[in-house]
Amino acid sequence: MKIVNIDSEIMSGTPVFNGTRVPIQNLFDYLETGESVNEFLEDFPSVQREQVVGLLEISQKIILASTALLHEDFA
């Protein structure tokens, strides 16, 4: 399942959930203000739960990889 779509013709290239016009940033804004994934899905019914879970899994991998890179000894 494709999770993210970036297309200059959709929302001027803002990353959105695939098949929607819902920016990915909206999910992080919801979570940052303490709202739940369920609340986000209720407000954006065009987004599938699997897309949200997949995006959070990808984000976790990116954070873990970034953390590992920042702790590497380049000497």
Image (tube, rainbow, N blue to C red):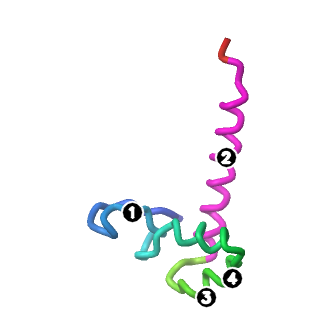
Left or right: 63 with respect to 47?
Answer: right
CA distance separating discs 2 and 1? 21 Å
- Does 64 appear in magenta? yes
**Residue type, numbered disc 2:** Ile
Residue 57: which quarter of the image? bottom right
CA gap, disc 2 to disc 4?
A: 23 Å
Cβ atoms under marks 4 and 3 closer than 8 Å = yes
- The span from disc 2 to disc 3 (Cα, nearest Å) is 27 Å
- How many neighbours does mark 1 have within 10 angstroms: few (below 14), some (14-19), or many (20 or more)? some
Query: Can you tell which mark lies on residue 38?
Result: 4
Kindly identify which residue carries mark 1. Answer: 14
Residue 56: in magenta span: yes
Residue 42, numbered circle: 3
Callouts 2 and 1 close, C-beta under 8 Å: no
From the image, tell me which residue sits under label 2.
63
Q: Pointer 2: residues within 10 angstroms few (<14), some, or many (20+)?
A: few
The kind of secondary structure element at disc 1 is loop
Q: Position of residue 29 (x, y in %)?
A: 59, 70
Residue found at x 53% / y 72%:
26
Relative to residue 48, is residue 70 drawn left or right? Answer: right
Cα separation between marks 4 and 3: 6 Å
Mark with earlier residue (1, 4):
1
Residue kind at label 1, given as amino acid type: Thr
**Amino acid type shown at disc 3:** Glu
